[in-house]
Image: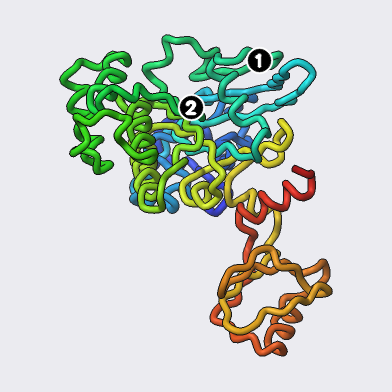
Amino acid sequence: MLSCNERSFTVTAYNTTLSPICQVLGDRTIDADRYSTSTISPHFSVTEHHTISMYFCQVHIYAKQRKYSTIAYILGIFVMQEPVIHVEHFAKAFGEHKVVRDLSFDVQKGEIFALLGANGSGKTTTIRCLLGIYHANSGTLHVLGKPYAPALSRMLGYLPEERGLYTTSHVLETIVYIGMLKGLPRAEAEAWSRAYLDRVELAGKAQDEIKRLSSGQQQKIQLGMTMIGDPELLILDEPTKGFDPVNRDLLMEMLMERNRAGATIIFITHQMDEVERIADRLLMLKDGTAALYGGVEDVRNQFGQNTIQLEFTGTLKEHPELFSVSRRERNTAVLVPRDGIETDAVLAALLADNVKLQSFARTAPSLQDIFVQISRNHGT
């Protein structure tokens, strides 16, 4: 039997209903955030950094987010597995300036993992140390179970923060060349590249020099160079930088497709709506330390159901004794009630001001609101 809620699911083995492996496991609850286990039965235990991952059995909340079919999480076959990324007690300094301090986190196979933080918080430095571009001062940094080495490059696609293209080269030959460097035969690299250019609406630019493309088009070429060969791990530093909303949506859909095909994705972004749309878990850095770490919904729920989202017409007046205005646009606003103030009191004040409400909902704060709150509480 497999039962699910928003935070965990419980597996109970009944005779031959599930696999023999599950019969050995007995009854246990599995945390959906880290896939780690809290043992109920004495038959099985796990070490600190080993995790239970599921093949043919997806966590319910992830299944809902990505629209997997029900069959995707009916079968229960569990395999012990190392994280794809393991970072433990990592620190990095440049001279006397400490950029990252005692940072630990894991990224599990098949996750979409968001790495967040203000400029200068240590995000890019962490990725560069993970990939051996910088040397860590201390700590453990593992990619696919070991320190990064060039031999892993064929299994990994990395989009760096700085863009680097041979601007006098032609579009198609550039992507094909990178594919061949990753070990693809020329014919396979060319077929993949043409399909990609067609998908991102650049098929007509295949023989153009890269310098003739717009910045957004060049970003698409660099993403193609990163994704060619369908690597099992993608690490993307601000992948939607320079994209308009239509192309942002296209990239989000492409990343979700790669994830459904089994790829693990780590991405750095300042766009919180992207995180809420596709990420399973997140790590938010503040001054080189972990300010938040966990499942996206769990992080939001840590801050309580303490915001009110409005759609309205009329004049929204200030009532500092009742609430603060976290975000305000033309006909929408997000209010944060003061401690001890009930929702009814806020509603009464709005109605007394003759504000006409199209919607009034108390919800968990958005990641955007949480990001701003953490930055303000700790200084930026």
Cβ–Cβ under 8 Å for marks 1 and 2: no
- Mark 1 or mark 2: whose residue is earlier in sequence: 1
Q: Residue at x 33, y 32 (%)?
A: 221
- State left or right for residue 193 relative to residue 231: left
**Which residue is denoted by mark 1 in the rendering?**
136
Residue 54 in picture, x, y percent from top left: 44, 35
Q: Quadrant of residue 130?
A: top right
Q: Amino acid at mark 1?
A: Ala
Residue corresponding to mark 2: 160
Report helix, strand or loop for mark 1. Answer: loop
Give the number of the disc on residue 277.
none
Q: As rendered, which of 261 and 21 lies closer to the eye?
A: 261
Q: Position of residue 134 (x, y in %)?
A: 60, 15
Q: Inspect the image, locate mark 2, and give the three-letter code of the amino acid beneath it.
A: Pro
The quadrant holding residue 190 is top left
* Figure quadrant of the C terminus: top right
Residue 243 on image: x %, y %: 41, 45
Q: Determine whether, in the image, residue 288 is placed left or right of residue 245.
A: right
Would you place residue 338 above or below residue 5 in this image? below
